[in-house]
Each structure stands twice: as C-alpha cells, then as structure tokens.
Image (cartoon, rainbow, N blue to C red):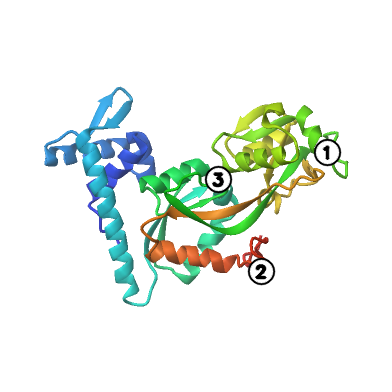
Amino acid sequence: MPSLENFRLTVFRAVAAQLSFRKAAEELYLTQPAVTFQIKALEDDLGVQLFDRAGQHIALTRAGEVLLAAANDSHARLQQAEQQMTALDGQIGGELALGVSTTISQYLLPRLLRAFLTEHPQARFRVVTGNTEQIVQSVLDGHAALGLIEGPARSREVSTEPFLRDELVLLVAAAHEWAELPEIAASDLVSAPLLMRERGSGSRHVLELALERVGVKRKSLHVAMELDSIEAIKSAVEAGLGVGFVSRWAVARDLRLGQQFRMVPVRNLAVTREFSTVALASPALVGLALEFRHFLAAQFPAPSGHAGAVRKARLRR
C-alpha cells in the first residue's frame, strides 16, 4: 500500500528532522533541487515561511513548528489507519519508523528484519540509526515509533523492555603483548591506550560502570581515541592503535579473529548489558510497533525461572 501522506508533508517532515535540504534529499532518494522545490511550493500554498535560511543553516520558523507538530500527529494517525486496514484481511502491514542503535543495526537488524518480513511480507520499515542517546531522542521527538537500544534510556518519558543480553569483550591485536595471556587484571587497563565509543553511546556507558564496579575509575583511563562505530574500533585495534571493548556479536563470525586480533579475558570483569526496545511511556504501543516488539520477545525468549538470564537466540549467529 502506498503512503497515505501528502508527498509535500513527507518532504517537509524530512527537512525538519534533518534541518538540512541535502540530508533530507539523501533520505528520500531525491535531488536537492527537488526537495527545495517541494518546500517552496508548500510555503506558497500556505502563504507562510516554514524555514529560516541563513547560509547553509536552516531552522524552523514558528509557523514551521506548528505545522511539524500537526504533520507528525497526522502521519502517526495515517500509519495507524493503514495498519488497521491491513489487519482487516488478517494481515500485519503498514510502515514502522524504527530507530536502531549502532551495534544492533550492524549485527542483528538485517536477520531480524528478514525473519519478520518472511512472516509479514506487507510490513515496511523506515530505519534511522545512531547511538543510544540519539535513538531515545528520536522516540521522544516522534521520529521513531519504536527504538532498539543497547544502553539505559535515561528519560522518564519512555519505557523499555529488554529482549537480549549482550557481553562486551576486550579485543587486542594479535601481536599485542596480552594476546597470548590467559587473562589480565582490570587494573592493567589503566596503562593501556583505550579505543572507546563516543559519549552518548550505550556501549561506553555500560563499560565505564562495569570498570568502576571493579575499582577502575573512568578518570584513570587513558582514552587514546573516541570512535563512532564498532567496526572503527576493530580496525583501529588491528592497526595497533590501542585495545578496545566490543560486542561479542561483533566478532561472533569475524574471520579475522585469531589472525588479526584476539579476545582477552579480564579477571573478575563482566561487562554485560541488555538490548532493549524503547517506546513512549504513553500512549501504549499499537499495531506494527507492538507486533514487532512481540516478535523480538519470541525470537529471544528468557529461560523459564531465570529472569534476566541470557536469552537464547532462535536466529542463527
């Protein structure tokens, strides 16, 4: 089913979300002049200016803010109507705006979507990615109906439900002095150049908390480099720029493991976290978003009688 939303409103919401005509064009697979034309035509139709343009920077005007709130509300209602109409035939369909944090999007999301779409071929997904903090904000802003995050959501306006437990492991280059050791002490990390995710990343937050629990203060760490993805950390480890912690999912099928880098246990250090869904606390999830959350719970069921235990994945790693 094609989108029920007016095309100019679709373009407007994309520009308002990105605050960039170029980025909106990339998101919509349009040329930048086409996006500019649609916004100009919408402004002419309404007789108001929707964006303040100052050089390469744009911002919503008061009129633009009013329209954005109404457009987001209308879009959500149309999505719900589309899902309800599809459900009349006993099908699950429509479009789901999904926000996904980096690790999940790189290593889990493709197989999750493949499995879900096999069961529900009429469903469509619009995916935005970022770190945990950015995905939570996307949910709060209404840009994503459901988020998948890898760290705590520090907002009382959202609710979370864990669906899978992950572990962060220490990665070192194959030529590193620790590579052949059975384990190292947590205190050894103080002297090592650490490759860390950027601030706002769920991975970094969970790692810093775990280290502090074993007496390693974040101020004592030598953060040699901040990187915005796990793949960047893995490449930097291979290049001998330092050591870093990455999701076990990120190396589960990596052919370079053992040749270019090694996993080294850290004595008494367990860096675990929950992958969780995040949604607005109110109103309750409905339609495709609710169905996808139920799907995740079915894919990674918690063993009976072991609340919080590691969930066993039905999907093959």
Which residue occupies the foreground of this view, 162 or 71? Answer: 162
What SS does tag 2 mark?
loop
What SS does tag 1 mark?
loop
Q: Residues within 10 Å of mark 1 (few under 14, many from 20)?
A: few
Q: Residue type at mark 3?
A: Thr
Where is residue 61? Give x, y as percent.
23, 32
According to the picture, the residue beneath numbered tag 2 turns out to be 303
The answer to whether 309 appears left or right of 6 in the picture is right
Where is residue 104? Give x, y as percent.
57, 51
Q: Residue furthest bottom?
A: 89
Quick check: marks 2 and 1 in contact, CB under 8 Å? no
Q: CA distance from mark 2 to mark 3?
A: 27 Å
According to the picture, the residue beneath numbered tag 3 turns out to be 102
According to the picture, the residue beneath numbered tag 1 turns out to be 185
Ranked by sequence position, the earlier of labels 2 and 1 is 1
Ranked by sequence position, the earlier of labels 3 and 1 is 3
Quick check: marks 2 and 3 in contact, CB under 8 Å? no
Q: Residues within 10 Å of mark 2 (few under 14, many from 20)?
A: few
